[in-house]
Amino acid sequence: MANQIPEEFIEEIRKSNDIVDIIGEYVQLKKQGRNYFGLCPFHGEKTPSFSVTQEKQIFHCFGCGKGGNVITFMMEMESFSFYEAVKFLADKSGFTLPDTGIKKESSMSEESQSVLSANDWLTKLYHHLIRYTKDGKEGYQYLKDRGIGDEAIDAFQLGFAPNVKDFVAEFLTKKGFHQQLLIKAGILSQQNDNAVTDRFRGRVIFPIRNHIGKTVAFGGRSITNQEPKYLNSPESELFHKGKLLYNFDLAKKHIRKENEVILFEGYMDVISAYQAGVKNVVATLGTSLTEPQAKLLNRYVETVIICYDGDMAGLDATYKAANLLKKVGCSIKVANLDNDMDPDSFIQKNGPEAFKDKVIKASDTYMSFYMRYLKKDFNLNVEGDRIKYIEYVLKELAMIESSIEREYYLKELSNEYHISIETMTSEIHEYRKKRGIPKDNQQKNRYTNKHTISQRSKKLLPAFYNAEKKLISYMLQDSYITDKVQEELGAGFNVDAHKIIATHLYGFYEEGHSSDISLFIERLNDDQLKQQVVEMAMIPELGNISDREINDYIRIIKNESNDSMNIKTLKEQQKLAEQQNDPLKAAQIAMQIIEIQKHLRNTN
């Protein structure tokens, strides 16, 4: 099979990669009935319309309409070519793709592929140097002094770039990489005198990996007085620091297990927490949290614990990050550190158990943090400031959906400032009224049937159209039904797309395949047909279908076909009567057409 991967191999790969497990690495899925639901990764939404069925090994979004099998998902999610998607899944399940005659197309430019390869070589080199050579000894000692052990050095592939200007240039040139490419990628730096040096020389190296574990950039930490203290690779096609989170690839499985993620500001905080046994941890890459990063977290988890530095800059950054995360739908907690502490220094001083119990488990709710954070802007010894402070807090409380939660904080305010709960509740109701928030509207679980059923608004479709869709949905699951339909209806579907799908299905079963929707999708070349098949396959089943129901669908489809044919014939006769100057006959034919159309409307 020239330029193709054997079908048997693709089928083996699909069966070895359960779609729920694979999609679960990108989307927080909740089981509901027979299917799993989550927030669609392909379009912005706050209520789940994305459905995955384990039984059929397919996914479908009722919001944007995307759907397919596990290979389709990887192609959509990672912008993979077909070959890259199959190879990725093969690697995950321990298979090796056959080489002969396969076209290894890539969705990435040749330049980016080369940079990825260079980054991979460099990651191994820097790590080898710090662990096993004299050249990396000072970097290794720095990490030891910071409390970082060998296990963490290996897990994060930490490394060291020797303070030798052409060490990396020579190494990568010998591997066949062009110097100009390495300069453009920010691996090498070109000086004013055109001399080329290692960008990260003399620094401890933190490989920055994307969410599938590929090194796309490096962070370098100075261990002397070299400025700047932290240096990252420049942004590129591979590396957008506002879209990536440090350690996300390793943390994903722990995030799903704990159902929460801890967000830090720096590499060392992540590594220290990992050593302390807290592994659902990620960090921004030297910048404030961005909306793409917040949306990424929201896809995976409901609760985010923000654990930034305890100083004023850290509190300001926490407030901004919390509001951004709330905006995309996350539930927020805030870890409380003393003013002179960051997460790394707290762990080094107090130990792992104290960090877990006194920082992470003792995290404040967002409201508690907000009330504490807001106090810095007011002199609460002054009556006017106290009133303003309480007004700000009440406005924030008005946004909380749970009346029980609102009352909890109102009691705190009442006890501290001696204002009646009734007065403050009345003020909150006024705020809610102005914002158009329903009175005491309890927060709904975002994973509910209502959201999964609410499909894109569609006009009411005729009975024959729905009959064809339902019939095909049963045909996808049962070869016996397909045989019956083929015998009685053949390609006599009224919708062109349905004719094509049915014809493909006849051939699929004739080749000896049993019902396998995921495999059938793979056989279709047209993306629109694939989407329609997935949509029909996701139609809820109402138990075993009877022969009578099948016959009803076939009858409705045939009637439409016959009526449509009759109308076409009558219109031709009407046109002929008009041409022959016979208005009476033309009018009689028009009445016949109207009667048939009326009959169609009544039956539809």
Image (cartoon, rainbow, N blue to C red):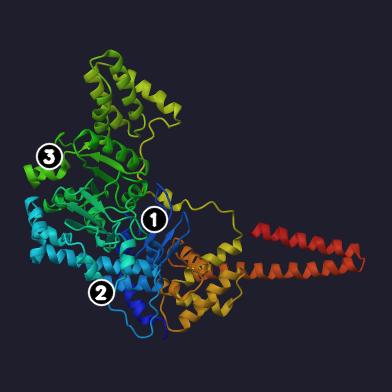
What is the quadrant of the N terminus in the image? bottom left
Label 2, secondary structure: give it.
loop
Residue most extreme to the right? 581
Residue 466: give x, y in percent of width and height: 56, 62
Q: Residues within 10 Å of mark 1 (few under 14, many from 20)?
A: some
Q: Residues within 10 Å of mark 2 (few under 14, many from 20)?
A: few
What residue type is disc 3 on? Lys
Residue 599: give x, y in percent of width and height: 70, 60
Along the polypeptide, which appears first: circle 1 or circle 3? 1
Q: Which numbered circle lies on residue 358?
A: 3
What residue type is disc 2 on? Lys
Q: Which residue is mark 1?
A: 41
Residue 400: give x, y in percent of width and height: 34, 33
Q: Are marks 1 and 3 in contact (CB under 8 Å)?
A: no
User: Which residue is located at x 12 percent, y 43 percent?
Assistant: 345
- Given residues 515 and 535, the one toward you in this image is 535
State left or right for residue 276 relative to residue 61.
left
Mark 3 or 2, closer to the camera? 2
Q: Which residue is mark 2?
A: 175
